[in-house]
Image (spheres, rainbow, N blue to C red):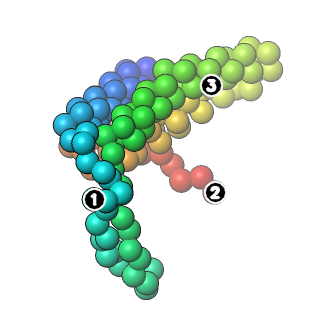
Amino acid sequence: MWQQQREALVAFINARFDDDEYDANQMPTDIDIYAAMQPVAVQGRGMEMVLRRISSRERLLRDVESKRRILAEVVEQIDDMDSRIEGEWGSGHKTTGESDLLLMLLALPYSEHPEYDAEAWKPEQRN
């Protein structure tokens, strides 16, 4: 992935994490989420499933924090490993190939956002 596209993708992901964190912080903290669960009927694959909305502020904040750590720590580690492999064995692959995929996967849940660049950021389906 070109460096400029990669930087734009990382900025997009960070902005969506900021949005998620803001939304989570707007949730009330004094609700018993188990008492507030509501069944929601969903049609899928010829059967009806019942899902429950279980969203707690703390769980959403943990979700954002874990994704931020993936972005900050795991992407860097993958890039480092790719660089070492390229340096030692000359694989001929881009040194950010696998972390580019991880970045695209982190952005995928936000693909309906108007700033999502599907042409550049949508990951290819692997078999």
Residue type, numbered disc 3? Ile
Amino acid beneath label 2: Asn
Q: Which mark is residue 127?
A: 2
Q: Amino acid at mark 1?
A: Ala
Mark 3 Cα-neighbour bin, 10 Å: few <14, some 14–19, many ≥20? some
First-in-chain label (1 vs 3): 1
Q: Nearer the viewer, residue 30 or 60?
A: 30
The residue at which mark 3 appears reads as: 78
Q: Are marks 2 and 1 in contact (CB under 8 Å)?
A: no
Cα gap from disc 3 to disc 2, whole angstroms: 21 Å
Q: On the rendered structure, is 10 left or right of 21?
A: right
**Which-is-in-front pick, marks 1 and 3?**
1
Residue at point 31%, 40% (across, down): 57
**Label 1 crowd (10 A; few <14 / some 14-19 / many >=20):** few
Label 3 element class? helix
Residue 4 at x, y = what percent? 37, 21
Residue 85, image x and y in percent? 74, 21
Callout 1: SS: loop
In whole angstroms, how far apart are the C-alphas of marks 1 and 3?
41 Å
Q: Is residue 43 left or right of residue 93?
A: left
Residue 87 in the image: above or below residue 126: above
**What residue appears at the point 64 percent right and 17 percent down from the top-left corner?**
80
Q: Earlier in the sequence, mark 2 or mark 1?
A: 1
**Quadrant position of residue 18:** top left
The C terminus is located in which quarter?
bottom right
Whether residue 107 is visible, yes or no, is: no
Q: Nearer the viewer, mark 3 or mark 2?
A: 3
Q: Position of residue 12 (x, y in %)?
A: 31, 30
User: Mark 2: which secondary structure?
Assistant: loop
